[in-house]
Image (cartoon, rainbow, N blue to C red):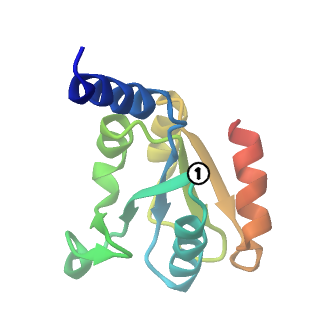
Amino acid sequence: MTWIKFRKRVERWLRWHQPQPINVIIIGIGYPSHKLSQILVATNSMQLIACIDEDPWSHRTLFQGVPVHYPSELIALAEKHRVDLIIDFDGESSVLDKDLIAEIANAKTMYCTLGTSDISADTVSKLLKELN
């Protein structure tokens, strides 16, 4: 076996056996979402997949490097990207109705709501512990 083939096999094996980050979708694009996304970027164990907002002028724009989608696209995004966690915020007018929250539960994706004052690295580490 040549060195190049061996190296490619080792690289492929390492990619396959590295721990995968937890995929997250955030509901909303306000200040709490911005603050939380900065904390998620700082941790290497969570990856922001998308943000959800119902305003038509923010659809398909980028928020912290990820696209903003409509609430009607949430379940498809969660299935496509194998999302582990969907985070919403108390105190803000949620864009999710009860039927959509029930669909999230059926999709076996963890859904949690955070208070706007609960956004911290400690809160994110607690969520990580619950998911693992």
Viewer-side residue, 17 vs 6 = 6
Q: Residue furthest bottom?
A: 31
Identify whether 94 is placed above or below 25.
below
Horizontally, is 50 left or right of 4 in the view? right
Q: Is residue 55 visible?
A: no
Q: Residues within 10 Å of mark 1 (few under 14, many from 20)?
A: some
Identify whether 101 is placed above or below 3.
below
What residue sits 22% from the left and 21% below the top?
A: 2
What residue sits 61% from the left and 62% below the top?
A: 43
What residue sits 39% from the left and 64% below the top?
A: 51
> Which x, y percent locates residue 120?
73, 73
Q: Residue 132: which quarter of the image?
A: top right
At label 1, the amino acid type is: Ser
Secondary element at tag 1: loop
> Which x, y percent locates residue 87?
57, 58
Residue behind mark 1: 45
> Which x, y percent locates residue 83?
45, 42
> Which x, y percent locates residue 114?
69, 65
Q: Residue 12: which quarter of the image?
A: top left
Identify whether 111 is placed above or below 36.
above
Q: Quadrant of the N terminus?
A: top left
Horizontally, is 25 left or right of 71 in the view? right
